[in-house]
Image (cartoon, helix red, strand yellow):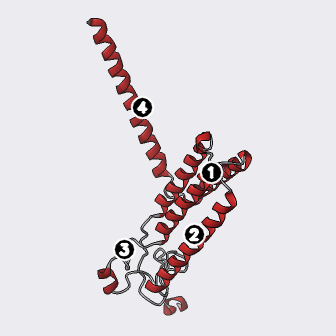
Amino acid sequence: MEGGDSSGAGAGGAVAAAAKWRSDASRAFQYYLDRSTPHATGRWLGTLAAAAIYALRVYMVQGFYIVTYGLGIYLLNLLIGFLSPMVDPELDPSAASEGPALPTRGSDEFKPFIRRLPEFKFWYAITKAFVIAFVMTFFSVFDVPVFWPILLCYWIVLFVLTMKRQIVHMIKYKYVPFSIGKQKYGGKKSAVSPSSSKD
């Protein structure tokens, strides 16, 4: 009985140690993830490097085209979420009836564009997708034989049709999902009157 108790205690200790290690690793990962939030340029350069590594891997093995196609469809869905407002006027009649709640022309009152998928979550989902797809290329079960030019043409057609629908939606409800040209507020500047400058 004592031997059984000691083995049970040892197994319980191992489970507790594994849970603690997992908790510490998750906390450390979240810490560095939070620290990377303001460094958008560095984050996207890292994602670009991950995409290049994945593309090189697929080119070298000449396979896993179905994985790449699935990755492309997933990235397209993420892009639509990134370009769409949090409250879609087409799905929420009350928002549409209250008037445009989205930024329009520069002469209008500035209204911030709130995305359905924020930039940080957009970046994180893309990076994680490339990492997962890269890992999948090491398992032959995902290397389904397929004629890749057909998949490429189908994805291009799907991309063009989806973006056309998104642009029509943007024109219809008069919003721009980018911050280019929008009003920015800087720090306070000391005003110097003409009379004081002459003294």
Side of 136 relative to 16 (left or right): right
Which is closer to the viewer, label 3 or label 2?
2
In space, the residues marked 3 and 2 are separated at their CA atoms by 24 Å
> On screen, 190 above or below 65?
below
Side of 57 relative to 14 (left or right): right
Q: Amino acid at mark 2?
A: Leu
Give the residue number, with chain letter if any, for mark 2: 158
Question: Where does residue 15 sit, x and y in percent of width and height?
Answer: 36, 25
SS for tag 1? helix
Instruction: Return the disc, 3 or 2, that comes first in the chain's sequence.
Output: 3
Residue at 42 percent across and 68 percent down: it is 116
In space, the residues marked 1 and 2 are separated at their CA atoms by 24 Å
Q: Amino acid at mark 1?
A: Ala
Which circle marks residue 21 in the picture?
4
Question: Where does residue 198 sit, x and y in percent of width and height?
Answer: 54, 92
In space, the residues marked 2 and 4 are separated at their CA atoms by 44 Å
Question: Where does residue 191 sit, x and y in percent of width and height?
Answer: 47, 84
Instruction: Return the disc, 2 or 4, that comes first in the chain's sequence.
Output: 4
Q: Amino acid at mark 4?
A: Trp
SS for tag 3? loop
SS for tag 4? helix
In this view, the residue farthest toward the left is 1
Give the residue number, with chain letter if any, for mark 1: 50
Which is closer to the viewer, label 2 or label 4?
2
Instruction: Return the disc, 1 or 4, that comes first in the chain's sequence.
Output: 4
